[in-house]
Structures are given as structure tokens and as C-alpha cells.
Image (cartoon, helix red, strand yellow):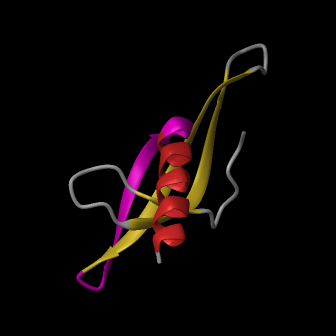
């Protein structure tokens, strides 16, 4: 499943932050077959935008699930 630009998710780690997908990176081989899909994401930290590069799709899926659970508790 490909996540569109603008998808919000929670980052992974001790202090998760709400991130937003800002770019989709696709890698193709010589036969023009899709080999890999990675994402760039951003979040704000002390008023500045921090960019996370080359996030795998599994990290985004896990973060979307974590954000949904967080919103259910509120």
C-alpha cells in the first residue's frame, strides 16, 4: 500500500512525534520494474522542520496505526 503525501503518522522511538509524509521515493531497475518505495517525512522540533529520510513503508504503517490508537484514547 502506498501512502500519499500529507499522510500523518507517529514516529518510532522513546519520544514519538507526529510526522507528515512529504515525499515518496521510488527506485526502479534497468527493466523499469519497481524495486523499492521509501518515504521522506517531516515534523516540527523547537520551531524548525526536521526531515527524516528514507523511511520504509513498514515504519509509516506502524506509525499510522499508533496515531489511530492515540486518537481513540482522546
Residue, x 55% and y 61% (percent of image)?
68
The count of marks equals 0
Taking the magenta stretch, the answer to whether it contains residue 7 is no
Quadrant containing the N terminus in the rendered view: top right
The one of 64 and 25 positioned closer to us in this rendering: 64
Percent x, y of residue 61? 56, 44
Residue, x 23% and y 82% (percent of image)?
46
Question: Eyeballing the image, is 44 above or below 68?
Answer: below
Residue, x 48% and y 52% (percent of image)?
63
Percent x, y of residue 7? 62, 63
Question: Eyeballing the image, is 47 above or below 57?
Answer: below
The one of 46 and 29 positioned closer to us in this rendering: 46
Q: Magenta stretch: give its range.
A: 46-58
Q: Main secondary structure of the magenta part?
A: strand
View extreme (right): residue:
32
View extreme (top): residue:
31
Horizontal arrangement in the rendering, residue 55 relative to residue 38 (left or right): left
View extreme (front): residue:
73
Question: Eyeballing the image, is 74 above or below 12?
Answer: below
The one of 48 and 61 positioned closer to us in this rendering: 61
View extreme (bottom): residue:
47
Residue, x 45% and y 42% (percent of image)?
54
Percent x, y of residue 64? 55, 55
Horizontal arrangement in the rendering, residue 63 relative to residue 36 (left or right): left
The image quadrant of residue 32 is: top right
Percent x, y of residue 41? 47, 58
Taking the magenta stretch, the answer to whether it contains residue 48 is yes
Amino acid at each position: 500500500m502506498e501512502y500519499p503525501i500529507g499522510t500523518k503518522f507517529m514516529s518510532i522511538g522513546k519520544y514519538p512525534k507526529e510526522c507528515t509524509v512529504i515525499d515518496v521515493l521510488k527506485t526502479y531497475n534497468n527493466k523499469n520494474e519497481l524495486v523499492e518505495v521509501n518515504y521522506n517525512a517531516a515534523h516540527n522540533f523547537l520551531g524548525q522542520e526536521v526531515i527524516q529520510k528514507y523511511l520504509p513503508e513498514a515504519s509509516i504503517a506502524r506509525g499510522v496505526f499508533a496515531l489511530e490508537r492515540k486518537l481513540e484514547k482522546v
